[in-house]
Image (cartoon, grey):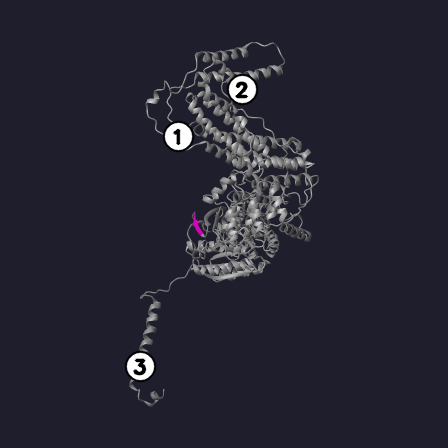
């Protein structure tokens, strides 16, 4: 920039991948001189990064007052809003008085609505439902990740817990509040106990627990109602404080001796000691890496962590007090008990090292120098002891060392190491120190008159201090919490509890729309509650894996069928349930179980451009994207059974098939797919016949007659009711060894019921085991035992608590749990795909939370190659699966036997099928025909030979005649 030739090549406003300019880096890290230089060169002061933050925002959030003042001098804008709607004012630390003053000079700070502590306003609480408690606590406690993005997020857990407890107390019941706080504090205790050696986590939770305690004490009603919880919080703070202190002491202990006792600030000094044989050997000079600066760096980092997480000054002071007490005691003991430190030269080195620590204390303006006084007195005595050759001088000198007892002085004198040419102390001084120590022992061992218990305790305690040679470094100084009372001097200031907007964005809500109130039907209950448990298990996996970056999934469960009747009012109530669920800001919906009710909710969700997934509704009508644009599902439609039937036919060697279907959307799509797929498999559909959905006997007889008269022997049935069709075929004599019936769905139970009813009404009885031998049924396969993803799902499912997750806790599923789990996982992976493919993920998250992604969430986006417990989830353009899982059942001697399994479009024959005659001989796919192949000796051969010969002779005669008379006028004319 200095030279004009090179100035043009420098881009001062260039940005990196996060759109950070050089000025942003200078503003964020408080480099005022660099920032001023750039501003003088005219860089853009109001440029925004990918988060929408400006230089002013970064300077404000990091408390760089000088930088903020400079930026404002250069007309930095107040009015710019980040992508999350944050302004520079929202990032101000209220405790920073100077920052508040600077901003107020340039523009009055906006006044925020006052927080009311004696009553609960609707916008001063966090509303939740019971099924969201786990999610809230996982987000704010169990799975909270450090470090935080900015200091404004430090108290987010305390704010959310307090505002949630506020809602529970004021708008629900005290039991609900107790339940919530009990779980929250238990989770917090688990986190603290799991991170006993993590200073960051411990400091973070000390700060949040202190703030939560402040909130509870300041709220006039919660102050009384949450008494036991306040005690628990106090205990947790004390526990976290103890863990933090012990971990810091461990770190300090690791470096104390090499940094403070072994480090030699004055190099090149070679000291020799009298009566020390080691002085005759050369010592190699080793440059130690650790020094007193290592200690100050450790203390600085601990202080920085406490301040960055906004730990109250009272607690911070107590932490450092405990560390300096430990430091002083350990230093004192190690000097005293190690003879190599008891000399004049070593004392000088240690004193110089100690001055570095004292300078750090003065720089930090901390009142801790008194902790070092015992060590300083010991070092001073070691420095001058050899010069105290006069007894009176010695006595007067040691009397000034009031923090050293006679036992300690005795050890210092007797164990002192004399350097070469250093004068030894007279014997009378050594004897004097020994006598003083002995007198002191006698003094404390002399029996005392009887006294009160309190006086006895005090004397006993002072005796231990007077006789102790070393200091107890494990002793914990008294710990106290700051209070709301300003008279104590350690006042705890409560900030206004708010939840940042970007945190609300992270709590993406998925609606679960199921008939939870329908408990009379056991089948429905299993589908609903088992499916709900699987969805919740999936949500836990999604959040633990952080599958959606920057987001956290929560569930809102809504009863889709609150009215048990089937009147118009029940339909109205169902629609109302769907609408109220969607109004709660959900970003996706899972449900319903029946196709009819699903069509109602899917129509509404598609209108509002909200994705909806079902794990049970398989009606083909839901494939209509003109009505259900945002609907997809994890259960395959029954149309896919045509593929399995055709593959089974191909494996059996059949090339000709007939199709009988109901004239409804399912039947029509079934036979159309059968025709298309058959063409790709070299199979010919010889005849397809429809029957009306009204199911009249005449039309059914006609359809069966037309179908079989065309020669179809292998018949695919996609018509209902299947059992009545099979009974009708039996009456027409079509249940024999010449025909094979492939049925859609498992019709065993309904067929048995209809056979029993038939036998009661007619004299001619039907033998179920004999007359329906060889029927084949194709049905959905849900329990994929042996399939690795399904086995993994069962392993996890079996570990769940059935009290919390109904129908779990066993290594099996009831019905659709695997599909419900896949529904949630596919939806989450679709969201992950949309966000990951965006250039601005924060903006994309905001759009997701606000429902503004629109066509970006159509069914094709959920084609994410997910392979779950129910196999691969591959979708077509309609949001329908292209493959499914099916079982092939075969009626053998009246029993239903599984003979085939189809997974992911591949059919595996697992057992030999039996046909109507009870054998495994495969029937023909068309009526038998005999080839006409006579031999020369048969009568028909002779007749054919005579007629052929006559014809040939007549042809030769005509040829000769025409050739002879070719010039005759008659032949010419002809």
Does the magenta portion include 292?
Answer: no
Judged by depth in the image, the label closer to the viewer, 3 or 1, is 1
Of the pair 473 and 338, the residue shown nearer to us = 338
Mark with earlier residue (1, 2): 1
Mark seen at residue 15: none
Q: CA distance from mark 2 to mark 3?
A: 154 Å
Judged by depth in the image, the label closer to the viewer, 2 or 3, is 2
Residue placed under numbered mark 1 in the picture: 267
Question: SS class of the residue under badge 2?
Answer: loop
Of the pair 842 and 193, the residue shown nearer to us = 842
Residue contact between numbered discs 1 and 2, judged by CB atoms under 8 Å: no
Q: Residues within 10 Å of mark 1 (few under 14, many from 20)?
A: few
Percent across and percent down for residue 545 are: 50, 44
Which of the 4 image quarters holds residue 120?
top right
Q: CA distance from mark 1 to mark 2?
A: 33 Å
Residue placed under numbered mark 3 in the picture: 959
Mark seen at residue 402: 2
Q: Is residue 678 visible?
A: yes
For the point 63% across and 30% down, the residue is: 231
Question: SS class of the residue under badge 1?
Answer: loop
């Amino acid at each position: 920039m200095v030279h004009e030739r090179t100035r043009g090549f420098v881009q001062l406003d260039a940005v990196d991948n996060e759109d950070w300019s050089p000025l942003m880096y200078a503003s964020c890290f408080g480099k005022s001189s660099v920032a001023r230089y750039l501003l003088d060169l005219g860089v853009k002061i109001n440029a925004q990064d990918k988060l929408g933050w400006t230089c002013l925002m970064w300077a404000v959030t990091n408390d760089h007052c000088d930088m903020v003042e400079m930026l404002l001098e250069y007309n930095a804008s107040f009015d710019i809003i980040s992508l999350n709607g944050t302004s520079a004012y929202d990032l101000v630390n209220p405790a920073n008085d100077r920052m508040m003053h600077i901003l107020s000079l340039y523009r009055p700070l906006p006044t925020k609505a006052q927080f009311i502590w004696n009553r609960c306003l609707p916008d001063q609480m966090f509303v939740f439902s019971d099924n969201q408690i786990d999610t809230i606590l996982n987000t704010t406690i169990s799975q909270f990740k450090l470090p935080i993005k900015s200091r404004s997020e430090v108290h987010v857990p305390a704010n959310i817990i307090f505002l949630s407890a506020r809602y529970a107390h004021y708008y629900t019941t005290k039991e609900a509040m107790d339940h919530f706080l009990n779980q929250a504090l238990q989770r917090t205790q688990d986190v603290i106990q799991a991170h006993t050696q993590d200073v960051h986590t411990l400091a973070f939770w000390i700060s949040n627990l202190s703030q939560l305690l402040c909130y509870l004490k300041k709220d006039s009603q919660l102050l009384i109602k949450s008494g036991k919880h306040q005690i628990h919080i106090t205990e947790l703070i004390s526990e976290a404080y103890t863990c933090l202190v012990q971990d810091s002491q461990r770190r300090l202990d690791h470096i104390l001796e090499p940094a403070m006792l072994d480090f030699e600030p004055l190099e090149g000094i070679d000291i020799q000691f009298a009566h020390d044989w080691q002085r005759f050997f050369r010592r190699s000079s080793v440059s130690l890496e650790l020094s007193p600066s290592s200690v100050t760096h450790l203390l600085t980092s601990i202080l920085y962590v406490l301040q960055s997480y906004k730990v109250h000054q009272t607690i911070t002071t107590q932490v450092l007090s405990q560390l300096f007490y430990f430091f002083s005691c350990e230093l004192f003991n190690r000097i005293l008990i190690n003879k190599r430190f008891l000399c004049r030269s070593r004392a000088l080195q240690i004193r110089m090292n100690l001055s570095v620590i004292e300078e750090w204390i003065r720089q930090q303006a901390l009142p801790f120098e008194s902790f070092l006084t015992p060590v300083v007195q010991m070092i001073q005595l070691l420095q001058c002891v050899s010069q105290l050759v006069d007894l009176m001088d010695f006595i007067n000198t040691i009397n000034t060392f009031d923090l050293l007892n006679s036992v300690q002085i005795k050890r210092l004198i007797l164990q002192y190491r004399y350097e070469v040419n250093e004068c030894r102390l007279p014997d009378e001084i050594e004897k004097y120190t020994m006598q003083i120590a002995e007198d002191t022992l006698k003094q404390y061992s002399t029996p005392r008159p009887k006294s009160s218990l309190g006086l006895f305790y005090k004397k006993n305690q002072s005796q231990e201090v007077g006789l102790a040679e070393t200091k107890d470094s494990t002793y914990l100084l008294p710990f106290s919490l700051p209070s709301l009372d300003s008279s104590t001097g350690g006042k705890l200031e409560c900030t206004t509890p708010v939840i940042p907007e970007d945190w609300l964005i992270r709590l993406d809500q998925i609606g679960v729309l199921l008939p939870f109130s329908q408990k009379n039907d056991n089948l429905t209950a299993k589908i609903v509650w088992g499916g709900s448990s699987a969805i919740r298990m999936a949500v836990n996996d999604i959040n633990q894996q952080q599958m959606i970056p920057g987001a956290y999934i929560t569930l809102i469960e809504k009863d889709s069928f609150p009215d048990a009747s089937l009147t118009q009012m029940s339909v109205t109530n169902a629609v109302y349930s769907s609408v109220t669920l969607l109004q709660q800001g959900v970003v996706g919906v899972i449900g319903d179980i029946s196709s009819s009710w699903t069509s109602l909710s899917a129509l509404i969700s598609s209108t509002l451009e909200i994705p909806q997934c079902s794990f049970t509704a398989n009606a083909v009508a839901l494939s209509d994207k003109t009505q259900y644009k945002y609907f997809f599902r994890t259960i395959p439609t029954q149309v896919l059974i045509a593929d399995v039937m055709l593959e089974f036919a191909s494996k059996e060697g059949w090339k000709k098939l007939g199709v009988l279907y109901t004239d409804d959307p399912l039947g029509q799509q079934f036979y159309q797919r059968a025709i298309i797929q058959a063409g790709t498999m070299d199979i010919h559909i010889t005849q397809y016949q429809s029957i009306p959905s009204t199911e009249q006997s005449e039309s059914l007889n006609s359809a069966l007659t037309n179908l079989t008269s065309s020669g179809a022997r292998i018949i695919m049935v996609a018509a209902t009711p299947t059992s009545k069709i099979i009974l009708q075929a039996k009456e027409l004599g079509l249940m024999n060894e010449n025909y094979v019936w492939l049925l859609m769905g498992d019709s065993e139970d309904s067929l048995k019921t209809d056979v029993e009813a038939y036998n009661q009404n007619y004299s001619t009885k039907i033998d179920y085991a004999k007359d329906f031998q060889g029927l084949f049924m194709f049905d959905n396969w849900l329990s994929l035992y042996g399939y690795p993803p399904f086995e993994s799902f069962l392993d996890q499912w079996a570990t769940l608590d059935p009290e919390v997750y109904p129908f779990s806790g066993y290594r099996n599923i009831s019905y659709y749990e695997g599909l419900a789990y896949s529904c949630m996982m596919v939806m989450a992976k679709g969201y992950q795909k949309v966000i990951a493919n965006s250039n601005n993920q924060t903006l994309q998250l905001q759009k997701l939370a606000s429902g503004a992604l629109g066509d970006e969430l159509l069914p094709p986006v959920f084609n994410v190659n997910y392979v779950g417990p129910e196999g691969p989830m591959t979708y077509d353009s309609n949001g329908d699966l292209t493959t499914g899982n099916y079982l092939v059942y075969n009626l053998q001697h009246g029993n239903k036997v599984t003979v085939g399994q189809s997974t992911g479009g591949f059919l595996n024959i697992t057992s030999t099928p039996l046909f109507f005659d009870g054998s495994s001989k495969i029937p023909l796919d068309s009526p038998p025909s005999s080839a006409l192949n006579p031999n020369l000796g048969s009568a028909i051969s002779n007749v054919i030979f005579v007629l052929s010969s006559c014809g040939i002779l007549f042809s030769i005669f005509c040829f000769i005649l025409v050739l002879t008379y070719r010039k005759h006028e008659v032949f010419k004319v002809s």
